[in-house]
Image: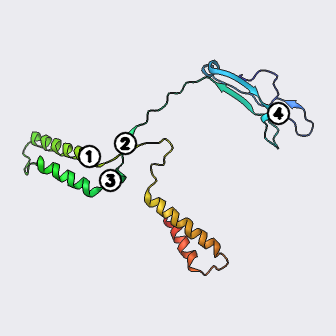
Amino acid sequence: MALPAGTPTLEAARSKNLTRPDNVFCSEGLVEALVRCEVVPHLRPPKTDHFPVLSTFSLSVASAKSSKRRNFRAVDWLAFNKTLSEALVAAPLPVVILSVGDLDRALARLNRALDAAVRKDVPLTSLCPFSKRWWSKDLERLRRESKRLGREAHRLRGDPENEVHRRFKAARNRY
């Protein structure tokens, strides 16, 4: 056990007796990293009977390297198509493919053209570990519209026949 024996962790509400129903267990590997484990009664929140247990560990955590990715949502698709067209005109693909080797060469040209267009016209973005990658500008717009109509519907809640209630319900369902 990580908490020293005999340390009270609870003060009974009526009798004010100090008892120890709470224990702190650690695995063998974690006990070696344990710096301190103690009860801190002065940090007890109001209306609670258990004392907080403060545990400190000496652990090293390797920070994740920030990686950059291509942001395909922010692409100027007209410029991308122009770059791709220019690259395909510069290295035309064969009209007829007669062998596996011809197919491999044509595929390599196509991949080079796509890679060049992606490198030129698709911006890089840094990934934040807290970002919601599924979130989009369309969802943001729908959220704003739903919130605005919700405020208006709440303001007109005394008039249930008002058109804003139907529009709010439809906007909320779309969002």
> In the image, is residue 135 above or below residue 170?
above
Dot 4 corresponds to which residue? 10
In the rendered structure, which amino acid carries the disc numbered 4? Answer: Leu
Q: Is residue 175 visible?
A: no
Circle nearer the N terminus (2, 3)? 2
Circle nearer the N terminus (1, 3)? 3
Circle nearer the N terminus (1, 2)? 2
- Which label sits in the foreground, 3 or 4? 3
Q: Left or right: where does residue 40 sit relative to residue 110?
A: right
Q: CA distance from mark 4 to mark 2?
A: 51 Å
- Which label sits in the foreground, 4 or 2? 2
Dot 1 corresponds to which residue? 120
Dot 3 corresponds to which residue? 75
Q: CA distance from mark 1 to mark 3?
A: 10 Å
Number of numbered discs overlaid on the protein picture? 4
Q: Nearer the viewer, residue 9 or 116?
A: 116
Circle 2 packing at 10 Å, graded few (<14), some (14-19), many (20+), is few
Dot 2 corresponds to which residue? 69
Q: Left or right: where does residue 118 sit relative to residue 160?
A: left
Q: Secondary structure at mark 1?
A: helix
Q: Secondary structure at mark 4?
A: strand
In the rendered structure, which amino acid carries the disc numbered 3? Answer: Val
Circle 1 packing at 10 Å, graded few (<14), some (14-19), many (20+), is few
In the rendered structure, which amino acid carries the disc numbered 2? Answer: Arg
Q: CA distance from mark 3 to mark 4?
A: 59 Å
Q: Secondary structure at mark 2?
A: strand
Q: Residue at x 72, y 29 (%)?
A: 54
Q: Are marks 4 and 2 in contact (CB under 8 Å)?
A: no
Q: Nearer the viewer, residue 92 or 82?
A: 82
Q: CA distance from mark 1 to mark 4?
A: 64 Å
